[in-house]
Amino acid sequence: MQPIYFDHNATTPVAPEVLAAMLPYFSDHFGNPSSVHAAGAEVADALARARSSVARLIGARSPREIVFTSGGTESIQTALRSALALRPKARQVLSSSLEHAAVLAPLDDLGRHGFEALLVNADSEGSVEIDRILNLLDSDSSRAQIAFVSLMAVNNETGVVTDIEALAQVAAACRTSEIPFHVDAVQRAGKLPIKVADIGCDLLSISSHKIYGPKGCGALWVRPGFKLSPLLLGGPQEGDRRAGTENTAAIVGMGAAAEAAMTYLADEDARRQTKALRDHFENGLLAALPGTRVHGGRSVRVDSVSNLGFEGASGEAIVMLLSEYGLCASTGSACSSGNHGASHVLLGMGLDVERAQGAVRFSLGRTSTQTEVDRALELVPRAVNELRSLAP
Ligand code: PLP
């Protein structure tokens, strides 16, 4: 039997139409898009179409605002580098303690080079304390010191959404002080609509493999007029903003994935179906397993994610046993040392280490089915009860 895959926040499968769009760019259309001859020009045209699709997915005014990268991590780090170059005297970076490691690890590294990361926590339901961010941006002394602000639009572990109005408030405060503001929209794109103009940020990152495109490809949206400092120097690709011959097949795939994502987002029934499956799954487990909590359950969440804490069993052990039973899920990402495998996101929400260690993230996808959910509702209680019976 095929394993049930409930780990779409880690990565999604490449959609069949995406694969079909990509394949000719490994064979017939192999030209270098920078070449002036016909073999290059046809690939350059395909990249232009993909750029336009990705631009539409996030409501960019022009495809020129899109820079293709190797993924969310590179997009984020290009954003950070650009901000530091624009504000060389500022020594602080403002973000939240719930960010992905692609943000937190470079901030940690900057800490060894004379910078300070101001990391705002979240409330117990996983919503970042936006007022604290706004307060910091409101004070003259801290404002002068802040080089960069970065916030995620949707948390990868809990699925909790930072609402667009809150992000827009941060953007407005940043604009007043000319502090570059970046939004990590890797987990929002393709799950909920997002329009850069509604936020008013300077930079926004997305990733192809979270939207049913190939891995190793992403995009950074750059506000017109914002001066980007490329991470990679060399050729004139991507409008002199990201050197290196483009990953052409992957970019074509990301364009096709963006088109498919727009179709999904416009399909109310499909989105309702995802939410109905997730809710059925979550409610089924809450009923079957006393001592189960939903992390971030009272916040607005994306429709596909359920982060659950099971008392008396470790998340890691549950995930391993479920894998044996044929269900793929994950624990949170333990990105900082010293937290004994507990998720930094859950710790940032105020959970104690033991509770955070009991968490499992289930993330459904566009192709998840009722049959899979029903089977998962047998497997998860079986795994949790088995582990609970072994606990001292
Ligand atoms: N930001 C968030 C919120 C993510 O979930 C991820 C990947 O899990 C990334 C950034 C990094 O993206 P990529 O894997 O494309 O480098």
Image (cartoon, helix red, strand yellow):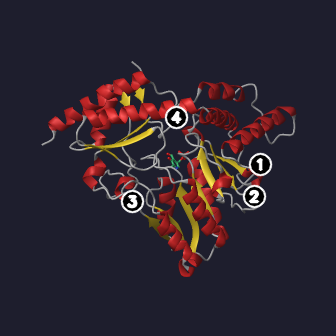
Label 2–label 1 contact, CB within 8 A: yes
User: Of the numbered discs in the image, which one, if any, rests on residue 301?
Assistant: none
Determine if residue 236 is in view: no
Residue 126: image x %, image y %? 41, 54
CB at disc 2 and ligand 1 closer than 8 Å: no
Residue at 40% of width from left, 21% of height from top?
Answer: 371
Instruction: Give the CA distance from mark 4 to mark 1.
Output: 27 Å
Determine if residue 257 is in view: yes
Residue 290, relative to residue 382: is it above or below?
A: below
Q: Mark 1 highlights which residue?
A: 62
Residue 207: image x %, image y %? 59, 44
Q: Secondary structure at mark 2?
A: loop
Residue toward you, 372 or 119: 372
Q: Mark 3 highlights which residue?
A: 123
Residue 199, relative to residue 140: is it above or below?
A: above
Label 1–label 3 contact, CB within 8 A: no
Quadrant in which the C terminus appears: top left
Instruction: Give the CA distance from mark 4 to mark 2.
Output: 31 Å
